[in-house]
């Protein structure tokens, strides 16, 4: 039982990463009906920007002779990197997706893949092939709750992720911009005719998705402080799977499916040898999709689907 | 090549560069180009060494001078002169000056039984490629990998272009083919620590290699059932995910199979995928896929892509069509995988991952959807570009994606999309009773 709970804690942490990234996929899908395949690499860029901001802040504070508390630096890093990565996301949308508004969806998917490769290689060219370790901003404290070991980092990761998800939910359901997004997701053709600026909404969607990915990247850097330029590939594709599993364009679905994917992976690794993790996890997903081809919260094909 | 075909009808009337090109080269039949290439490579074989020495080049530029030019910019004029003298000038001369003779030859071939003309063209093409590749081992490997890329691109175009699905499972099919073939050849013919001593004499090997490749293709096709059967109920994004899951599953499965080496991979494949073998298989692939997409079955694929419901109403058996499309494409991907394993003589599961997927997808979408022509162009240009820019090392992976993004922005379906590849039309003489001019 203790062993089980220990894995639940780990799964919650992994699930947070997947869910935060999957949200970005799902939001873009809801608005533009295409998957931003560069999203995994935006997660990577976010982690690197976080690294840059954190090191910069630490250097600045030590130069000024002020000892800033670690959590303060962390919060500042997360906020600043979210803004910066949002700019990267908006640029990606402007360069790679806006010229392709009327093109077949597969072409946009290819552009996304290529932008991803450019981001990876650009990073490699700028920073070299060495792995970078994320500065440890907060001391790890381990609590023993009835035999289950919980670190303050894990709690922080889950809490920050859930807070961000709640904030996103509030934004989408309580603000005018959120309403515009929902309207756009409802009808891509008519709503722009009603005066909703499609390009602004699309850019905003990319910005929000990228900001969430940046948060995921920094949280990942806090938990596993080794960054490399290709870390976004596997995370990106797995989060893409989660976004589909949750149902296209469904925010709630993407969140739940992200956590589910984290749970499946951790628990498969708990029961079976860890080399079998991908094999079994994806077989389970295959079975789920066979019985629910539209994911958990997705709707069947309709006239909405532009192929 | 494409230019000459398009401009055949209006050669001489257009102005500007296209008109000039049309007037210069519009009357050269395919055999003329091939003969020109043959002359060029023979010339390179005979006088390449003294000429490169004369021009101050360290050795014959191995890939059209790109690597020399990028590594030592000072040698650009020499490399350029070499390429002009060896390739451009002879090809231009043969194509331009000998075009009446070539048209005569082409006309004679055209009137012989239908299979003769393609066979002669292929023989000349093979001779040129063989002599070209003979000059260095690097060229040999590059050429064979390029031909394999053509096979892969063609087979993926069948699913993504002709059938209109977004399949991500192609490296998985390839891996199945590669491993099946490797197990067959290494297990039966080689002394290997995984499989024990050879069971059959190595002399019988090359004759049984086609059987091994067919087996690899068949296993890949059986694997494709995992993707094909869900495709009856769903399509688009969900099928993309199913195919992606299939790719991950295959890769993970191979990593966990100890008897094929697990994540360390398999080596010691016999060197049977020589240039003639790869060339013949590529021709076979091109021929069957081209015939397939031009048959009623291929038209049914297009119908399913454009409107499944309407196709169903018009008595197209959509299930059978999808099944055929997937299995056929997977079969050729498996064969290509088997050849790939025997060209590199080493495979590991990491080879067949997301990077391979991005590479093959890039070739398909660069060349053009729904087009055999486009697949050839895409595979050849992306793999040549990849090799030509090798000297730029990492920047290569910024230039190629940028190029592809530009292609997607200006031609969203690829360079040469939605064109038929009519072999007889390509090989037809350009003047005389059978030509159109």
Image (cartoon, rainbow, N blue to C red):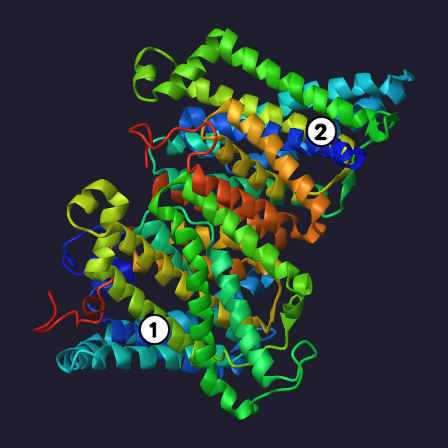
Q: What element carries label 1?
A: helix
Residue A161 image-quadrant placement: top right
Q: What element carries label 2?
A: helix
Q: Nearer the viewer, residue A167 or A210?
A: A167
Which x, y percent locates residue A75? 75, 18
Identify which residue is drawn at 82% across, 31% down. A135
Residue B392 image-quadrant placement: bottom right
Which x, y percent locates residue B309? 22, 41
Question: Which chain does the numbered disc 1 sit on?
Answer: B
Q: Is residue B242 left or right of residue A274?
A: left
Q: What is the crowding at mark 1: few (fewer than 14 residues within 10 Å), some, or many (at least 20)?
A: some
Identify which residue is drawn at 39% across, 45% down. B407
Q: What is the crowding at mark 2: few (fewer than 14 residues within 10 Å), some, or many (at least 20)?
A: many
Q: Mark 1 points at which residue?
A: B284
Identify which residue is drawn at 16% across, 77% down. B110
Q: Mark 2 points at which residue?
A: A218
Q: Which of A171 and B328 is in front in this view?
A: B328
The numbered disc on residue B339 is none
Q: In this view, does B12 lie to the left or right of B98?
A: left
């Amino acid at each position: 039982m203790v062993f089980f709970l220990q894995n639940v804690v780990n799964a919650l942490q992994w699930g947070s990463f997947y869910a935060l990234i999957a949200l970005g996929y799902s939001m873009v899908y809801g608005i533009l009906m295409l998957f931003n395949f560069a999203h995994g690499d935006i997660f990577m860029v976010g982690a690197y920007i976080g690294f840059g901001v954190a090191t910069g802040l630490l250097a600045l504070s030590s130069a000024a002779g002020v000892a800033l508390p670690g959590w303060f630096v962390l919060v500042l890093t997360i906020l600043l990197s979210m803004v910066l990565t949002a700019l990267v996301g908006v640029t990606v949308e402007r360069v790679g997706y806006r010229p392709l508004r009327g093109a077949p969806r597969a072409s946009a998917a290819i552009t996304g893949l290529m932008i991803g490769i450019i981001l990876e290689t650009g990073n490699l060219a700028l920073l070299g092939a060495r792995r970078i370790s994320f500065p440890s901003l907060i001391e790890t404290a381990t609590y023993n709750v009835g035999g289950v070991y919980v670190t303050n980092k894990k709690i922080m990761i889950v809490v920050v992720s859930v807070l961000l998800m709640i904030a996103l939910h509030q934004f989408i359901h309580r603000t005018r911009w959120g309403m515009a997004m929902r309207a756009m997701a409802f009808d891509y053709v008519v709503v722009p005719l009603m005066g909703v600026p499609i390009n602004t909404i699309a850019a905003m969607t990319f910005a929000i998705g990228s900001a969430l990915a940046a948060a995921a990247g920094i949280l990942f850097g806090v938990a596993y402080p080794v960054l490399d330029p290709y870390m976004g590939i596997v995370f990106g594709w797995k989060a893409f799977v989660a976004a589909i599993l949750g149902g296209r364009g469904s925010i709630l679905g993407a969140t739940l499916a992200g956590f589910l994917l984290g749970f499946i992976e951790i628990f498969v690794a708990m029961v079976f040898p860890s080399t079998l993790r991908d094999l079994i996890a994806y077989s389970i997903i295959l079975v789920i999709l066979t019985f629910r081809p539209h994911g958990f919260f997705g709707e069947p094909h309709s006239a909405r689907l532009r192929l | 090549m494409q230019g000459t075909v398009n401009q055949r009808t209006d050669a001489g009337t257009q102005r500007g560069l296209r008109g000039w090109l049309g007037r210069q080269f519009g009357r050269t039949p395919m055999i003329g180009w091939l003969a020109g290439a043959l002359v060029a490579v023979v010339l390179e074989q005979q006088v390449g060494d003294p000429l490169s020495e004369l021009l101050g080049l360290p050795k014959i530029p191995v890939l059209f001078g790109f690597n020399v030019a990028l590594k030592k910019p000072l040698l650009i004029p020499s490399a350029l002169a070499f390429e002009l003298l060896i390739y451009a000038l002879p090809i231009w001369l043969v194509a331009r000056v000998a075009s009446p003779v070539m048209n005569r030859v082409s006309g004679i071939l055209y009137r012989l039984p239908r299979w003769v003309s393609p066979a002669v063209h292929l023989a000349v093409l093979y001779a040129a490629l063989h002599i070209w590749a003979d000059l260095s081992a690097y060229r040999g490997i590059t050429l064979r990998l390029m031909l394999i890329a053509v096979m892969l691109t063609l087979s993926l175009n069948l699913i993504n272009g002709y059938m209109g699905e977004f399949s991500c499972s192609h490296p998985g099919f390839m891996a199945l083919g590669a491993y099946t073939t490797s197990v067959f050849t290494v297990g039966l013919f080689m002394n290997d620590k995984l499989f024990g001593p050879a069971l059959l004499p190595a002399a019988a090997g090359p004759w049984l290699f086609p059987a091994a490749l067919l087996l690899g293709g068949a296993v890949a096709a059986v694997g494709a059932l995992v993707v094909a059967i869900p495709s009856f109920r769903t399509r688009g994004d969900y099928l993309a995910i199913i195919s992606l899951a299939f790719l991950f599953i295959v890769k993970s499965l191979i990593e966990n199979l100890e008897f094929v080496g697990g994540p360390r991979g398999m080596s010691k494949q016999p060197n049977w995928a020589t240039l003639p073998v790869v060339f013949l298989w590529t021709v076979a692939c091109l021929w069957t896929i081209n015939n397939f997409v031009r048959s009623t079955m291929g038209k049914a694929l297009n119908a399913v892509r454009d409107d499944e419901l309407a196709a169903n109403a018009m008595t197209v058996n959509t299930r059978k069509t999808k099944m055929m499309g997937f299995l056929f494409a997977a079969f050729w991907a498996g064969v290509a995988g088997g050849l790939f394993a025997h060209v590199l003589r080493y495979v590991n599961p990491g080879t067949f991952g997301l990077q391979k997927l991005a590479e093959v997808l890039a070739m398909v979408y660069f060349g053009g959807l729904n087009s055999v022509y486009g697949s050839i162009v895409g595979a050849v240009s992306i793999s040549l570009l990849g090799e030509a820019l090798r000297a730029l090392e990492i920047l290569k992976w910024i230039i190629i994606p940028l190029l592809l993004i530009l292609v997607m922005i200006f031609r969203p379906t690829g360079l040469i999309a939605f064109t038929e590849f009519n072999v007889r039309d390509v090989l037809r003489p350009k003047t005389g009773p059978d030509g159109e001019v």
